[in-house]
Image: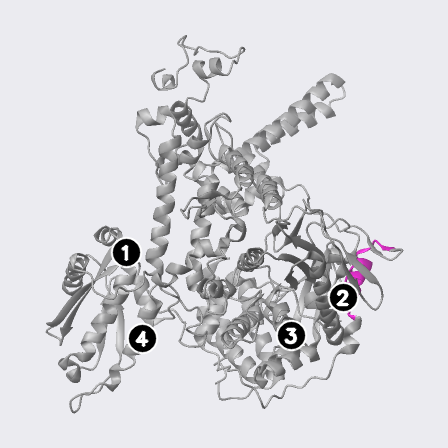
Amino acid sequence: MQEDIFHLAIHKEAAALGEPPPAQLDLTPEALDQYTSAIIQAIKNALEASTKRAHAHPSGHRWNKDCQEAVLALRGTAQDPDTPPTEIEAAQRTFCCTVHQAKRQYWRTQLDNFTDSQDVFKAIKWNRTEGSFPIPPLKDGNRVHTTANAKAELLVKTLLQKAACTEDIPINCSNPEATLPFPNITTGEVHQAIFQAKSSTPSQDEISNAVLKKAWPVLGPHISALYKHCITTGWHPTPFRQALLVALPKPGKKDYSSPRSYRLIALLSTLGKGLERLMARRLAWIAIRHKVLHPQQFGALPCHLATDLAAALVHDIEEVWACSLFASMLTLDIKGAFDAVLQGRLTQRLRSQGWPPTVLRWVSSFTHDRTAAIQLDGHQSPTFAVPAGLPQGSPVSPILFMLYIEPIFKLGPVLARRGRFGYADDICQLVASKSLEENTAKLQSIVTDLMAWGHREGLTFDLAKTELQHYTKSRKGNNPTCTIHTPEDTVEIKPPPPNGATRWLGIWFDRKLSFKAHARTLAGTAKQAAGGIQALANTVRGVKAPLLRQATIACVLSVLCYGAEAWWPGMKRPAQDSSGRQKPISNRVSIQLACLDRVLRSALLRVLPVYKTTQTAVLHREAAIPPMELLLNQRRRALAIRVHKLDTQHPLHRWATHQRNFHINTCLLRAVDPSNFHTIEQIDPLLTSPWDTNLMPKEQPTAIDKAQAREDFQSNAAGAGWVGYWGSCKTKIFCGHTKLPNHEVFDAEARGALFGLQTALKDPNAQHSTNLYICLDNLEAVQQLQGQPKGSSQSVFKQFQEAAQTWPFCLRTFNTQPERVQVKWVPGHSGIIGNEEADKEAKMGCQAPLGFPLPPASIAATKHAAQRVHWQAFTQFWSEKAPQQYRDLGIGLEKRPPELHLPRPALGRLLAARSGHGDFAEYHERFKHDDALLTCSCGCRKEPSHFYFC
């Protein structure tokens, strides 16, 4: 894209659009459709004027001058009638070798020139072997569909055209008993919906998120006006309801000739997805804040992760075991999920939940008169109508589906609801009793009730995907089945064998919660990811080590650590012996840990240019990646901190704060330590709503290096200092400081701003003042003071904002007009008198005595402490496992070893010399390499440091 041409073109198109319609003007649905089409066309015109369409040339970039000369020589030889066949064959071999060498040199150059981690992530995909092929013929009973049109028709018929559409009810968007709030849209919300969107595939209009962001400075007022009028009118424009469907195969399916082995993903207008994203955030926040959804119903909700739900499930199972009971789990899957949602019943559900008519009208419009075309095998089908369902690919579809199935989590007795968990369309039912047979009877009754509800609502549970898993520590081999009766048939759900496991939310649950199957599965998946890295480098050439390290952390460690919050209990746990003394006992997870460590070692061998026999401790030190035990323990500490940032209805927060039975000591409770829960501040993620303040970012200065400020606050206690000046002559009128144990510099800045504001409000000079300026040298603190605080010191920022609102109401002298409190950023350590005075006060605060009562530790300080513990554990590991060569050289740990940035050949020689594992005489003799050459070309014996002197 030529950005200068794009900006000129978009300004011209914006001028043609004219002024945005005012908020007071009521626009009809037809007018909104026309306005939407005009905005889309304006962006498309600017894009076409400034961007040249790319055409793929798959092999042209590998063709060089040598290849051209070789092919000319081959042609000349082949065209000469007097050339013998042997010479032609030799010319052909020469040509093939030349092309092969050119390809190899091209890819080597590509790898050597990688400078960004994104380049590495793209290169890892080179090893994918599935390729891009047409989907196989699809079966419909005994009939086989082979053409693109026939396969598209079958997919649409099977996945989109539901027979249950006849069971829908009339739409009623009036709701005089609406109880849920839904204020007007703000410009800040619109900006956030556009700029916080991730990159996604554009729809038929070819407008990507990046293009939309570039057009925002000019078309922002028009986009904001469009969104506001759409919500006010309750209309989702028709251009936003046109989708291009792409059939993606579901991973892990055995039979891809079945239409149900595919998922139809809707490619929607990015401009329309911005409006849908805005609605999704509002619906999710209101649903949590006003308790519309059950606390154990997860999915498209902020701060509600799948691993959180798995951790809550493990906690409940361990709690059942502590009561000497047996537990059983049955997983259910809603057939069709998004595609099974009926428009009238969805509107009725929202009415019963108390949503206002504006929301009902918009949702009804969103689901009504949708059209789509399916892209399959390079062929696009004709446009057809979609009679029902929610488009997969829309940001608002997940939360609407959760609201649609919300009654599932309120059916049955209290104990049944207490053991019901849900993530999107995956339902899990946990029951407990004194026998497994009694559990299966309970599950049978519960499933019967759920299926009856689904039949009334037009939903079907896919019993073919239903799984049963028993949980018991008993060695008895009883493994009862669960029989489910349906109107058509009787289905017997069989549990896996006692040594088997059941997968739910990506975690494999086995009978005794040992998670051995889960560890093996993670190891296998991570090994495949590590294999993609292997082809990118060796000991003498390839991608630089820092980039491969980043790829390993993102692609391998993320897999190895998945679900650790739920299944990793630590190597040992505290217990009391017969005499009452505390004595740690093993959790018996060494087998699982060894399985993961083997894969991590294999990945580190690919990151570093080292021999396979290099000591494991050396690999961890040189790559600056700790062993798996330390990484898993860090995940547990991160969970303990994250619980303090969850809403009070979140299951993990409830279990951490409810009155504890000391006979119950689950993995979750040991991680979060409820007895000390109150010593860390609590963050309320629902404190500020999406529409509370204007989220439009203000002009921000460039952040300066805060290394000096960090050096001033290296202890566990930070100091807050504040200084007040009055008038144009800047007369100093007050100052103060305080000590803040277990706080970071960021928290101290927030406290200093609050205390300074409170002091200024009480100062007698306030009655003669108009504006109040708060100046800080911490950019993040300035942004939090003016925005929506959601992190560390949240309560302090909120107190500041509430106190700032009282400034205009302070008593003032005659003719003194109050204005407002303004927060300004100033550069630190730049000789500004007020800032230097405040820094001196802060340093005095570090040395001041502690005040009482002590404030809870901030989230930022707690995270820093967890990182410090993690690093100390890594340091302890290295001190115990470091080879003697490293001890002799005095080589310690570094968080970012600078030698990793060396060229790969030089780094390989350095690491070989350090570890002693390389092409050295002593190394070959130790491993009995009888055919190895022990002397250098100069005649000297090969030693680790010989390359430096040779």
- What number is the disc on residue 801? 4
Say which of marks 2 and 1 sits in front. Answer: 1
Q: CA distance from mark 2 to mark 3?
A: 38 Å
Label 3 sits on residue: 407
Element at badge 4?
helix
Query: Do residues under tags 3 and 4 come within 8 Å of each other at their CB atoms?
Result: no
Say which of marks 3 and 1 sits in front. Answer: 3
Q: CA distance from mark 4 to mark 2?
A: 56 Å
Looking at the image, residue 102 lies above or below residue 940: below
Say which of marks 2 and 3 sits in front. Answer: 3
Q: Amino acid at mark 3?
A: Pro
Q: Where does residue 255 sit, x and y in percent of width and height?
A: 78, 50
Tell me if mark 3 has few (under 14), some (14-19) or many (20+) residues whose alpha carbon lies within 10 angstroms of its own: some
Element at badge 2?
loop
Looking at the image, residue 376 lies above or below residue 172: above
> Magenta region: which residues?
144-162
Q: Is residue 321 magenta?
A: no
Say which of marks 3 and 4 sits in front. Answer: 3
Q: Main secondary structure of the magenta part?
A: helix
Q: Amino acid at mark 4?
A: Gln
Q: Where does residue 455 sit, x and y in percent of width and height?
A: 76, 73
Label 1 sits on residue: 704
